[in-house]
Amino acid sequence: MDYSADNVEQAVKQFYLNPSLQSEVHFWLTGAQISPDAWSFCWDLMSPNKGIEVQYYGASCLHVKVVRFWHEIPPEQYESLKSKLLQMIVQFASGPKIILTRLCVGLSALVLQLLPDKWPDAIQNLISTFQQEGFAALPTVTRCQILLEVLTVLPEEFFSTNLSQQRRIVLRQELTKGLDHVIPLLQSLLTDESPLEVYQSALKAFSRWVDFGLAIDRAEPIIHQVFTSMRNPHLFDIACDTLVSVFSHPEAYKYPVTIQRILSEILALHDLLSGAIQDEDKETSEGICRVIVALSENHTKLIVESVLGPEDVKLNTTSLLHMILACSGLPGHFPVDECCSDHTFTFWYLLQDELGMISEEDFSPLMEVFKPIFFSLIDVLLVKARHPPEADYSSWSLEEKEKFRCYRQDIGDTLMYSYNILGVELLAQLVNCLVNVVDKYKQGNQDWQNVEAILFVFSSISESVPADEKVYVSKLFAQLRQIPFANSQQISTALHMIGSFAEWMQWHPETLGYVLPLVLQGISNPEVGTAATIALKDITRENLTNIQPYAHQILMACQNCFETNVLKSRDLLRLMSSVGHILSVLSPIEIMQYLNQMITPHIEHLISLAEVQPSPSVRADVYTSVNIFAWLFGSLDTELDGKDEEQQHELQIKRLQQQDPSEPKPIYVILDQISPAIQTIAYAWIFDTGIIEAVCDLYKKALQKLDNDFAPLSGDLTQLVINLYQRCPNTAVIDLCKQMLLIFGLQENFIPFSKVIVGNICSRSLSLFDLSVRNFTDVIEGFMCFLAQVMKKLKKIILDCNCDLTAIFHAAVLSMSLPEHATVKAACSFVIEFLTAGAENEVIKSIVITYGHVLVDRIMRAIGGECQRGIIDFIADVIMTLNKHYVTQLSLWLKTVVENEGYPSPRASKQDKENFIKNLLRDRMNKRRTRDVVKEFTLLCRGLLGTEYAEAAAVLL
């Protein structure tokens, strides 16, 4: 079907009326849009008698043609195109607005194409044009609005259009010259006499030219006019947006003197802000806060320096800081009563960061001003962090509750940064505050929310507290025992706070006696079980040196929880992890005594589950039961690797005295008992990815802890992983196999198992390539990672196991064409190892020489544009390996690149390809240079070389 106006019109109508054909019609319309015929039919589609959808498509076609296919129109038609476009704008002057806006965008694109040679002084000419006879029939307000719309979208089009660096420089210079005419026009329109619609359009245009680069000092008169317009309710929102654009501009910091003058305008908003807060006018208070914060967070350096300036400047700066405090402390609860206090958090972070860079001589005078400000901020945020009354909170939506949770987290981060300024003085204030609040709370004069907020703040700053602080944190934990906890929220926050100081307790073990009773009480309460088990896990992990006196107390509390079974599954897993940490500090005899007492019920339960047929009703129980042992194995460390050396030495001496060398490790004893059940479960649930991952995780953790002691079970495990992978390939199984090979692979008695594992993994994985390989990219990625490790560390195994190395090579090449970055990276890693091995092995070398051209073809197609640019570095590393070990063959293979026209991209000429190959072969041992050469050539092949977009992309690549 030809691209005639009638056919295109019918296609557009079909697109909107027939959803089942949308994809097909969209493809056809895209082809119509880029065809040369679009230059003619776009005008027909914008006829007054056409539907709005058809008209919009016509206007969009015109814009696309001007932006992307400008080369199709001869220069002698430029003037007629411009006249026709202006006539069309007049036609749609009264609407529809969507068409008019699209035509104005098209006119902006035309300006950018014709500047500077074909349409010199285009902006001045446009302003004059809208005052001439052709537009005289339009109302003055309409003419102004159309002109302002064009001036608004012109900077936007400049940024959105793909331009070469040189062209962008030229256009920026021309548009900057145009500012000489834009600024007076905007000033003349931003007056009280202007109609409201014109004033709004002028503000919007001004904002876009500020984004373009209108300097603040040059725009200062207009900025003052914008502040005046904030007093007009009809202009308030757009005025706020405009000022935010002005103050947020990346180069605004270059004009500190102008900002100081403008500051008086900000301070003059104080009465407006106070009135809005008092009247509970959320929209007005939010708009003013946005303006204040935009100026402040982009000029923190100026704020800090101003405090050391003249008294009037210092006074203004202090007033600004108090206005920001007012914004931080807006009345009510976020996000229900107000939703802009969170805008200030970035400013407080930037301010403390700026203060952290001041010189020692300026430190004291600055702190005289800023410490009181930060102390006030603490008071403000303590109020904002409070939970609302329970009756109100229960009426909140889930989304509002989640926003409040995130908001509290942001408060916590802000307070953590404040510690950098206030140090232990912050702790002192918080402890005093806690003491006062708890006293009033016990007398019934305070709500529980006030106590909870302070505990939350303590947990937020815990990471900043140094290990040698022993005054205020100790007082905190002593005070903790005085709190009559009222509800689960308050207890949970207290438990989270305790857990956050777990590392600090390592240096202050006397604190454990204060906190463990509350934590152990919490683990038996399902309402606070999550917080309690997290705290216990952190405490036991960080305090192995000091936890032994409390071991029996903790283990009995954990056993009681297991027996009552009131906790959630995840809480039970954390509890088992804590059990493992505690057992790690006991003697082997004690470990086995506790294990027999605590773990036997879990073993029996696991065995019973193995006898149950798979069904959705038992799935969660099976998953949790397997993971219970995985988490125990992950934390039970009888070697205590990496722990305190003195403690490790003492425990080793104790163990040598008590342990029978012939006795197996505790993990082995448990694993030996549960392995049959685990294997039965694995076969029964073989198609359940989650359970198979849990099974593999269990064995991986056992392998990590047992190392060579695992050997007696290695045969059974080998048979299990082979059977699992043969029936249902799974990444977790591959990872487990990889770990087995890395531990036992080259041990003499395990080598037969190693060969069987590698052979079966390879044969089953290769069979996936006969199917739809894109359905198995996660498994392919795991397979390639497996091969890379085996080829790197166990080359002898893969060479002796009768694997089809040729098929593996072809599979790796095919994997390099998959869309997932991680899969391509893994494939490239294996290919590099394979190519490197070929330098020493004749079999591999023969495969590379015979089929290397296939690899080079895949590489060139990737460079030519068939793959995403994010993987180009991986591809370049493969080229470098070829260049290092097969330079002669590579130069021959690359000849096809030069000889095949349009390969690997029609954008690359024969000379371009010759230069690429020459540079590759010349810099064959330089990794960075090879990557740069490949990046440059892939950008050329994609038509991006020399563009500003390409420069940004090159940095990311």
Image: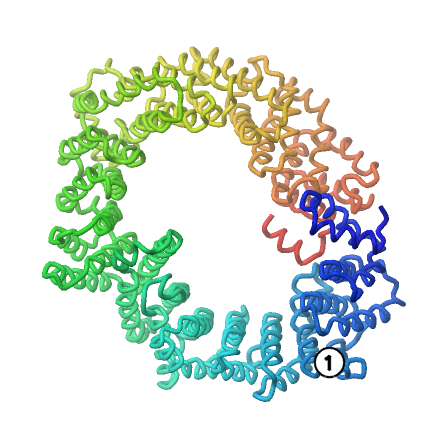
Q: Residue at x 40, y 20 (%)?
A: 614
- As drawn, 672 above or below 872: above
Relative depth, front residue between 169 and 335: 335
**Residue 67 visible in the snapshot:** no
Provide residue 631's location: percent of width, then percent of height: 32, 30
Q: Residue at x 50, y 74 (%)?
A: 237
Side of 483 where 104 appears, left or right: right
- As drawn, 361 above or below 627: below
Relative depth, front residue between 54 and 84: 54
Mark 1 neighbour class, 10 Å CA radius: few under 14, some 14 to 19, many 20 or more: some
Q: Specify the farthest residue to the bottom.
A: 193
Provide residue 769's location: percent of width, then percent of height: 63, 24
Q: Which residue is mark 1?
A: 127
Q: Which amino acid type is marked by label 1? A: Ile
Side of 762 where 298 appears, left or right: left
**Residue 720 visible in the snapshot:** yes
Q: Residue at x 74, y 71 (%)?
A: 92
- As drawn, 824 above or below 848: below
Location of residue 438 by image quarter = bottom left
Location of residue 712 by image quarter = top left
Provide residue 749's location: percent of width, then percent of height: 42, 10
Relative depth, front residue between 64 and 669: 64
Provide residue 481's location: percent of width, then percent of height: 12, 51
Relative depth, front residue between 47 and 647: 47
